Image (cartoon, rainbow, N blue to C red):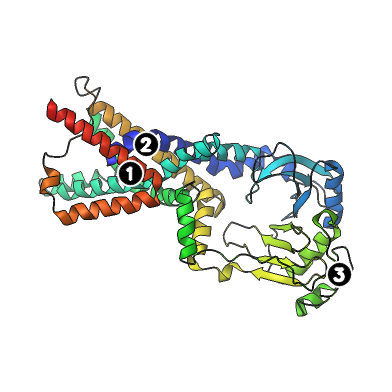
Amino acid sequence: MHFWAAIVVGPFILVAALTGAAYALAPTLEQVVYADELTAPGTGPALPLADQVEAAERVVGDGGELVAVRPAPEPGDTTRVLFTGDDLIESQTRAIFVDPATAEIRGDLPVYGTSGSLPLRTTISDLHRSLGLGDVGRLYSELAASWLGVVVLAGLGLWIARRLRARGPGQARARARRDLVRPDVRATGLRRLFSWHASVGIVLTVGALFLSATGITWSQHAGDNVTALRAALSWTAPTLDTALPAESTGTAGGAAPDAADVAADPHAGHHGAAAPGVSDVDPARFDDVLAVARTVNVDTGLVEIKPPADADSAWTVTEIKRSWPTQVDSTAVDGATLAVVDRTDFADHPLMAKLARWGVDTHMGTMFGLPNQLLLVVTALGVAAMVVFGYLMWWRRGPAGGAGRLRAGRPAPAGALVRAPWQGLVAVVAVGLVVGLFLPMVGLGLVVFVVVDALVTAARTRA
């Protein structure tokens, strides 16, 4: 299993590891490449969001619909005003970067998803996720993520078995076991490659399994299975209810009750005039809605404010701080009355939903900032090195070291299936079916490996 999977899937794992290492550093690289757009030289207090939104709208004109605002989280940062636009990919918006102190336009760039990835990180992400080939290309990353865990676990089993089999006098046995944990720099040839492969592999085991498990959650087919499993076990995060009460008929541009009154009575001012459509968004409402959310559960600078999707929906204010400590609370506010419609709090999320959130953010390098990113780079480059070591070992044992013969590894002893206990066979088949159905790319690979192994065995038998 370790041999076949590594040989066949190795190139996919190598590409995923190298692009993943580049992606891990992308958030830091963005701060350098897009310094003009991300930084605001203006000094003094921030202008109302309404003024900043209006400045952005003058740039966009009729070229897009306003979809969200991300206020400047810290002094010296810019505000992002997000619009729809032409020539954008799915989940991408057009961001106008505004100096909050002067309303000066600092940039105009496409951004992607909740992470707000700028073009550099979006390009690297696309390569890492699908090689730029869309849904077809996503099969590559799913293959790599699914099989990385299998290869690592199989390698761990081989490492444990070899460590248990280490023999000889006390010192020789101790040295043999140490060489499985640290590389033997005195060895040469195949033995030296194996020492590096084994020692680096055991050090990276936890990190590689983490990358495999969290990467699978984004995959096309296995990711759907993970989502379905989480939903069945109630491991999903609660969703914010944005449906307005039937009796709410206020207008988003009408007079707003005082924020303190709203905090004391979430239903204050609940009776007003009719709610507008999304085309009638009043820029001043961004300030009002944010002020209300601040009195409820929004207490970080990193937030996104969204106008209602339609006349029957509420405004939403969502924390988007993905670093530690995680802050992803959200509030839905009636734009007509500024009454609080609903709220969700990260503290109330199920434990598994929290673990999933932390796992994804750590995988993306946002959880602990630069130290997180550097650790991901080291782990990813280590996985890439493992693939290279493995191919070099195979080459030394096969074409280069085996009289030109392309060896496919040591065959199982003849009659192994006949001699195996039936309970073992049933267990192996059952586990294979469960894993193969949950991780379709692993299941497809298992079928291919079984067929190829049978053909190789048949060829050796005839020979």
Which residue corresponds to mark 3? Answer: 256
The residue under the point 78% across, 67% down is: 291
Q: Secondary structure at mark 2?
A: helix
Which residue corresponds to mark 1? Answer: 151
Which residue corresponds to mark 2? Answer: 9
Q: Secondary structure at mark 1?
A: helix
Q: Residues within 10 Å of mark 3 (few under 14, many from 20)?
A: some
Q: Earlier in the sequence, mark 1 or mark 3?
A: 1
Q: Quarter of the image containing the C terminus?
A: top left
Q: Name the amino acid, label 1.
A: Val
The residue under the point 51% across, 63% down is: 353
In the rendered structure, the answer to whether residue 415 lies left or right of residue 151 reads: left
Q: Position of residue 237 (x, y in %)?
A: 56, 64
Q: Position of residue 314 (x, y in %)?
A: 74, 64
Q: Earlier in the sequence, mark 3 or mark 2?
A: 2
Q: Are marks 3 and 2 in contact (CB under 8 Å)?
A: no
Residue lying farthest to the front in this orientation = 246
Q: CA distance from mark 1 to mark 3?
A: 60 Å
In the rendered structure, the answer to whether residue 434 lies left or right of residue 215 reads: left
As drawn, 226 above or below 341: above
Q: Residues within 10 Å of mark 2 (few under 14, many from 20)?
A: many
Q: Name the amino acid, label 3.
A: Ala
Q: CA distance from mark 2 to mark 1?
A: 9 Å
In the rendered structure, the answer to whether residue 201 lies left or right of residue 303 reads: left
Q: CA distance from mark 3 to mark 2?
A: 60 Å
Q: Quadrant of residue 412?
A: top left
Q: Quadrant of residue 197?
A: top left
Residue lying farthest to the top in this orientation = 404
Q: Are marks 2 and 1 in contact (CB under 8 Å)?
A: yes
